[in-house]
Image (tube, rainbow, N blue to C red):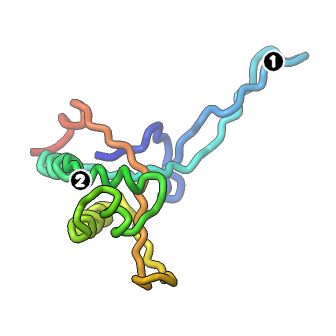
Amino acid sequence: MILCDRLTKVYNGIPAVDDLCLEIPAGEGMNQNIYIMQKYICTCKMITTSTIPELSKLLAFLGNEQRLRILKSIADEEKYAREISEELSISRTLVNIYLKQLERMGLVTGTSRVTDDPPLMRRYYRAVPFELVVSLDAIKKTEE
């Protein structure tokens, strides 16, 4: 289950968090500090699992070292499969397979673009921010 940190409310289907962002000290004629709260849209991916087999499948999927290395490679900048393949010394075919799997799981987004250099059509990938939380309480709530 991939959950958003500090989730408080959902506005029009979009998760949002409250964040304490500013404290104004008590001034003349004021007897307490004023706190300004600001709403932020949660940008991390939320995936929930309701059964033990689903949780096991997710953990096994993310337990693959090469998939994790690919996620790390595209965490900060987008790249296309050949760049990832050369950087990580993994075959381009396997990189493409893993990228498609990661994209199906919603952990990666891909964008096709036309370039001047061959190959003329490239698909660039970037990791989607997420947080993975697995606790005993979460496991107790899952169904068999």
The three-letter code of the residue at mark 2 reads Gln
Residue positioned 71% across, 33% down in the render: 36
Quadrant containing the C terminus is: top left
Q: Work out whether 15 lies above or below 37.
A: below
Residue 50 seen in the figure = no
Residue 20 seen in the figure = yes
Between 106 and 119, the one lying in front of the other is 119
Residue positioned 13% across, 45% down in the render: 52
Residue 60 percent across, percent down from the top left: 16, 49
Residue 119 percent across, percent down from the top left: 40, 82
Q: Work out whether 35 lies above or below 48.
A: above
Q: Work out whether 94 lies above or below 143.
A: below
The three-letter code of the residue at mark 1 reads Ala
Q: Nearer the viewer, mark 2 or mark 1?
A: 2
Q: Quadrant of residue 86?
A: bottom left
Q: Quadrant of residue 73?
A: bottom left
Q: Earlier in the sequence, mark 2 or mark 1?
A: 1
Residue 84 percent across, percent down from the top left: 35, 62
Residue 88 percent across, percent down from the top left: 30, 56
Seen in the image, is 144 located left or right of residue 39? left
Q: Work out whether 89 lies above or below 1.
A: below
Residue bearing mark 2:
66
| Marker disc for residue 26 | 1
Residue positioned 28% across, 50% down in the render: 68
